[in-house]
Amino acid sequence: MKCPFCGSLESKVLDKRESPDEKATRRRRECLSCKKRFTTYERVEAADLVVIKKDGKREMFDRSKIRTGVLKACEKRPVTLDQIEQVVDLIENDIRKLGSSEVKSTMIGNLVMRRLKRLDKVAYIRFASVYREFADVRSFQKELKKLLKS
Ligand SMILES: [Zn+2]
């Protein structure tokens, strides 16, 4: 691992930590030449995944899009960034567990809603109202009533 400060290849690992999904390993290193410290991430390359959108177009799966949607839904809610990262990890796992190389965007939306429902009810309602575009107002209102009661 090359030191970003002096380019030396000699470093020692001070600390090693796995991310919750065990797909990334974070290593804190110290350069043996200049003694400066830096962090490296090693991420396992996930298999390609294609998303089929509502209009039938296909695009490569992009985890950051899920993250953006979740972040938006959780705006000003008592949810930490760590919790958001964790929930995005869980959603990505859910999607990959389907075991298919193609996934419909509606399926992804459902998985996001399922996870958000457990994380924060308001975030869930926000996401659902945008995601479902009020296409199914009656069932949405029913769900909303159920949530407000509990
Ligand atoms: Zn160095």
Image: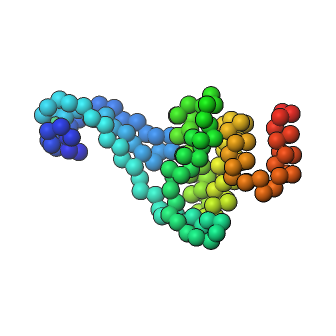
Q: Residue at x 12, y 34 (%)?
A: 33
Q: Residue at x 40, y 36 (%)?
A: 17
Q: Residue at x 63, y 41 (%)?
A: 73
Q: Nearer the viewer, residue 97 or 104?
A: 104
**Residue 118: where, in percent of width, then height?**
70, 39
Q: Quadrant of residue 9?
A: top left
Q: Residue at x 55, y 69 (%)?
A: 58
How many numbered marks, from 0 up? 0
**Residue 75: where, in percent of width, then height?**
60, 35
Task: Look at the image and tell me whether residue 118 can be seen.
Answer: no
**Residue 21: where, in percent of width, then height?**
51, 44
Decide: is 102 above or below 132: below
Task: State which quarter of the image contains the N terminus.
Answer: top left
Q: Is residue 31 left or right of residue 149?
A: left
Q: Is residue 85 left or right of residue 150?
A: left
**Residue 41: where, in percent of width, then height?**
35, 43
What colour-coding does the image apply?
rainbow
Task: Look at the image and tell me whether residue 21 can be seen.
Answer: yes
Q: Nearer the viewer, residue 67 or 31?
A: 67
Task: State which quarter of the image contains the C terminus.
Answer: top right
Q: Nearer the viewer, residue 137 or 36?
A: 137
Q: Quadrant of residue 135?
A: bottom right
Ligand 1 in which quarter: top left
Q: Quadrant of residue 53?
A: bottom right
